[in-house]
Amino acid sequence: MAPAKNQECGIAAIDHGADAVYIGASRFGARAAAGNTLSDIKALCEYAHTFMAKVYVTVNTIIYDNELCATKGLISQLYEAGADAILVQDMALASMIASGDGLPPIPIHASTQTDNRTADKVKWLASQGFSRVVLARELSATEIAQIHKAVPDVELEVFVHGALCVSYSGQCYASQYCFGRSANRGECAQFCRLKFNLEDEHGNVIERGRHLLSLKDLCLIDRLETLLDCGATSLKIEGRLKDITYVKNVTAAYSRKLNDIIARSNGRYCRASLGRSNYTFEPNLDKTFSRGFTHYFADGRSADMSSPLTPKAIGQYVGTVKSINRNDITVAGTAAFSNGDGLCFFNGNDELQGFRVNRAQGNTIFPQRMPSGLSRGQALYRNSDQAFEKLLTGKSAERKINITMSLKESAPGNIILTATADSVSAITELQCEPQTAQKPQTDNIVRQLTRLGNTPFKCTDVSVPQDGIKTFIPSSLLSHMRRDIIQKLEQALRQATADARTEASSKAANTKTEKGDSNTYPAAYPYLYNVANNKAAEFYKSQQTKAIPAPEINMPPHALLMQCRYCLRHALGMCTRQGGHPHSLKGPLYLRMTDGRRFKLQFDCARCQMNVIADK
């Protein structure tokens, strides 16, 4: 599943091999800057559904009381536009859809914003009508397998690539607390990418001016088969704010890898959509935005998850500085450079510094402005590759669905043409003058019917009776039949996708699961349920769950701002449970922002979790 900032990115994702895309509507998405009109979403659905690919729309923020009516209207419009499901965080919406409270029967997926890290939580969500659950990024492959074993009938979606939030999703209130911008409202201010000092209780600095909460980007392309074996239904790429070149490159890389896995799976796995993509470029994840890559917790806790020196894209290593002259730099390495490339390096203060290549001659580069702080032997990285970007400009992939055709004559002059794509077929019939063909016409029939040009189809076989078609069929009529059958087949594929939506909604409504427990969080933190409207409050009351208004409405004192599986003690080698060295720090630790604000770190070693607490 690929991200789509807009319709253009969504179509590019489909062309480059995505089985599904997820996109934001005009409002109420967890990326407020990535909204789209209903007409664009409808057009994307029509395009995707030809390939039986799905379009999921994010309505995954918490909703205020005065927005519920507008949100209900939006969901109804998305259903009419053809959206295959919506991703939801606010349980008010889930309860209204499940109960048919003035809303259409659109399938609902539990966004990762609902904080899905246990089998009990997944079980409970399924009992509330969710057909799919997007799991927390922090889970290991083993934990995913355990959840699948406990709830085998629930579709599990797993992030495999892209930016990582240091807090469990839906449980981060730091941006709201510090800047009045709620992550649960799609307005995250990237608190975790800021610089901090790590201090003891007396203000002594242990680590100074580092991006201590900034994680590398997730990359599990070499763990896809493991995740499938563990029960993952959907493999998700993060990046609804990323540009089209990111979408093209990353989607192509993962689609190609998935095809390789399926090819050797002996029928165990198959793609969820139709069509095979061919590319005009070689996908390369190292050439797309990243902060460096990590497997995160896929294999369990490990070192090297964070990027403490910078939250920016470092790019691909291209060599070391061999010599520096007045106007040029010679690079030791095998990389080729292009005019306009963006290069960067870490200066003497461990700060990322960049410069633009104005001109390149072999391994000698002429910057627009000579960078200060660069010295011989320093490593250089390329975070903007102009040659690669040029390959992705314009059309860089073509996706075709293999179809077969069958032509027969049911009666003199009555010609029937059938086209089949996978299990979907369309039929067209033509009555022509019963004039006997004077010579064999099979070759011309095949030639005319397989001229599919700019359609999404490629005909791999045309079946004609062994003794041929007796009635002469003019080429003009064959062309007419070809155009008609292609139009009907596209309609049939779109209808099959719509039928799948109805089936998914019905299955979720009728699936009987063990109810599970809605009491997910400690009683001391009843605001973690993110209740932002009266409907959600009534829902949790009916579940016998104590829930109070979300921090966006009433920020409690000394609030639990973040729950993180990533742990600074472990990252700094101080976790004795994980083989680190004992440290002499007896009191609590704190993070201090550059503006002086301080946050207490609470280490819940029994749960292997680090909490960030508001200092007041």
Image (tube, rainbow, N blue to C red):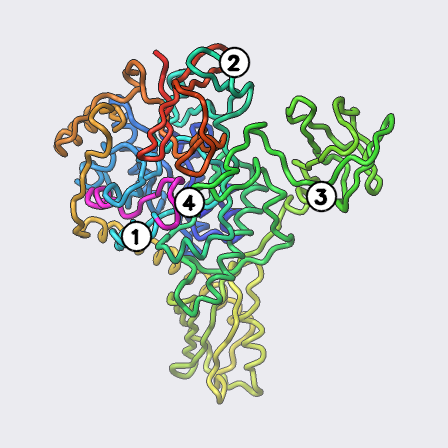
Q: What number is the disc on residue 387? A: 3
Q: What number is the disc on residue 148? A: 1
Which one is earlier in the sequence, the residue at label 3 or at label 2?
A: 3
Q: In the displayed image of the protein, which residue is found farthest to the right?
A: 326
Front-most of residues 586 and 451: 586
Distance CA(mark 3)–CA(mark 4): 37 Å
Secondary structure of the residue carrying numbered label 1: helix
Front-most of residues 204 and 257: 204
Where residue 339 sits: x, y (%)? 77, 37
Q: Quick check: 394 left or right of 64?
A: right
Of tags 3 and 2, the one toward the viewer is 2
Tell me which residue sits at (24%, 31%) in the image: 521
Q: Is residue 54 among what the camera can see?
A: yes
Which one is earlier in the sequence, the residue at label 3 or at label 4?
A: 4
CB atoms of marks 3 and 4 within 8 Å:
no
Secondary structure of the residue carrying numbered label 3: helix
Distance CA(mark 1)–CA(mark 3): 43 Å
Tell me which residue sits at (46%, 35%) in the image: 580
Which one is earlier in the sequence, the residue at label 2 or at label 1?
A: 1
Instruction: Identify the magenta region.
Output: 123-142
Secondary structure of the residue carrying numbered label 4: loop
